[in-house]
């Protein structure tokens, strides 16, 4: 299988010209229906023309801007592609080549363009070339990794300038206005920082309460082994899911109980570590059995957890109001949809209006805190200059 060469590979740096154009693959990694490669910079039209073999008519440089041309690119038969000149009149002309998705087809196109004189760069380089600020660049990169439509909507707002515009309003306002806006922005960071990586939710409980079966019910397929033998789950089993449109990494962990088995003990230690690092813990109880001291200890460890009373399809063995818990059955699916809604509301307790500014990278939050500190110390001009540098960075 042919894969796109790494930007660091020496083959990507021909010595033919200091002014060689650049190329990058702008579609996300992995398999897909279409792959898109951009070539830009001095000589981009000539490089693309040398690599492109049109099905009909003259070469690519004879085409007007915006006209789609069908042809082939790559060694041997190559891959059938669509090529279009995006910009021909500026100091940095640009060509887009659309090929079949997947590493092999994209690799053929990249290798042909490199052989024609282009140098590979990361998508970040192309975005810096095409966008107005470093925030736009980061938002474009994050948008390519968006796993749900809701995440894409928020990140698209940032691509379209929501965060840039809010920074300009902070820059133009008084110190008090700036501090109020910065406080609001930083408050959204807990939400924004989870947009790409997702929220972490961990199932906790003693053995055999139904954690693995609940994980499978939430996933919609069998991901975890379900067995009546206590201690079956030793490692952390994770799935990627969407709760009410928000990306979630859901983890099933080892049941917590006293044990002399060193492997099970190691699994329990790993479980506790994951629970400590979670955005939310779901404590799973078995409603068909009496509450145990182990159940109460787990509840005490996680006072902010969502508590579920599983096995609601079986007769209850403790009073309904003994503990505030959501009755569900991982076996039948009853109550699972309600659990998803409850978890989503805990993870994202509010939605900001469309077009809201949201910081989504740790570096953004650090810059906002530094700017806020300048304003608080009375260094208004210094804070304004910091915003100017941020907005002007490419």
Image (cartoon, rainbow, N blue to C red):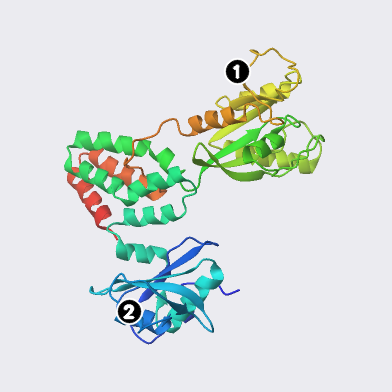
- How far across and down, in percent of the image, does residue 231 sit? 78, 37
From the image, which quarter does the N terminus lie in? bottom right
Secondary structure beneath label 2: helix
**Residue 333 sits in quarter:** top right
Query: Is 64 situated above or below 206?
Result: below
Category of crowding for the residue at label 1, using alpha-carbon neighbours closer than 10 angstroms: few (below 14), some (14–19), many (at least 20): few
Separation of marks 1 and 2 at Cα, in angstroms: 67 Å
Query: Is 300 situated above or below 195?
Result: above
- How far across and down, in percent of the image, does residue 340 sit? 56, 32
Secondary structure beneath label 1: loop
Q: Which residue is mark 2?
A: 45
**Residue 44 seen from this side:** yes
Q: Residue at x 35, y 62 (%)?
A: 127
Question: Horizontally, is 15 left or right of 339 in the view?
Answer: left
Q: Which residue is mark 1?
A: 324
From the image, which quarter does the C terminus lie in? bottom left
Q: Residue furthest bottom?
A: 16
Q: Are marks 1 and 2 in contact (CB under 8 Å)?
A: no
Viewer-closest of 137 and 279 = 137
Q: Residue at x 31, y 42 (%)?
A: 355
Question: Horizontally, is 88 left or right of 285 in the view?
Answer: left
Category of crowding for the residue at label 2, using alpha-carbon neighbours closer than 10 angstroms: few (below 14), some (14–19), many (at least 20): many
**Residue 370 sits in quarter:** top left
Nearer the observer, disc 1 or disc 2? 2
- How far across and down, in percent of the image, does residue 206 sit? 72, 30
Q: Residue at x 79, y 42 (%)?
A: 262
Question: Horizontally, is 10 left or right of 321 in the view?
Answer: left
Mark earlier in primary sequence (1, 2): 2
- How far across and down, in percent of the image, does residue 200 sit? 55, 40
């Amino acid at each position: 299988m042919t894969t796109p060469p790494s930007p660091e590979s020496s083959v990507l740096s021909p010595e033919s010209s200091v002014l060689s154009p650049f190329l990058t693959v702008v579609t996300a990694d992995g398999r897909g229906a279409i792959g898109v490669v951009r070539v830009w910079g001095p000589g981009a039209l000539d490089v693309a023309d040398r690599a492109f073999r049109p099905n009909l008519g003259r070469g690519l440089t004879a085409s007007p801007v915006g006209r789609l041309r069908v042809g082939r690119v790559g060694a041997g038969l190559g891959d059938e592609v669509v090529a279009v000149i995006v910009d021909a009149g500026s100091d940095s002309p640009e060509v887009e080549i659309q090929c079949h998705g997947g590493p092999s087809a994209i690799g053929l196109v990249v290798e042909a363009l490199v052989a024609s004189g282009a140098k590979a760069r990361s998508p970040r380089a192309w975005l810096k070339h095409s966008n107005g600020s470093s925030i736009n660049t980061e938002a474009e990169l994050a948008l390519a990794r968006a796993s749900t439509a809701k995440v894409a909507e928020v990140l698209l707002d940032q691509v379209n300038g929501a965060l840039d515009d809010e920074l300009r309003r902070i820059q133009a306002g008084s110190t008090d206005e700036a501090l109020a806006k910065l406080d609001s922005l930083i408050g959204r960071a807990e939400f924004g920082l989870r947009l790409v990586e997702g929220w972490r939710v961990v199932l906790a409980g003693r053995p055999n309460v139904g954690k693995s079966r609940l994980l499978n019910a939430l996933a919609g397929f069998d991901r975890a082994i379900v067995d009546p033998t206590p201690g079956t789950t030793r490692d952390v089993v994770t799935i990627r899911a969407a709760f009410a449109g928000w990306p979630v990494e859901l983890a099933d962990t080892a049941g917590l109980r006293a044990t002399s088995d060193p492997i099970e003990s190691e699994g329990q230690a790993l479980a506790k570590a994951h629970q400590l690092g979670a955005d939310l813990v779901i404590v799973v109880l078995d409603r068909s059995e009496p509450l145990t001291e182990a159940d109460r200890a787990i509840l005490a460890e996680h006072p902010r957890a969502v508590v579920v009373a599983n096995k609601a399809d079986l007769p209850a063995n403790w009073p309904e109001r003994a503990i505030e818990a959501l009755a569900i059955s991982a076996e039948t699916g009853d109550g699972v949809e309600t659990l998803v809604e409850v978890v989503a509301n805990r993870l994202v307790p509010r939605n900001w209006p469309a077009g809201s500014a949201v910081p989504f990278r740790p570096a953004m939050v650090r810059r906002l805190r530094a700017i806020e500190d300048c304003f608080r110390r009375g260094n208004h001009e210094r804070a304004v200059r910091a915003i100017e540098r941020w907005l002007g960075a490419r």
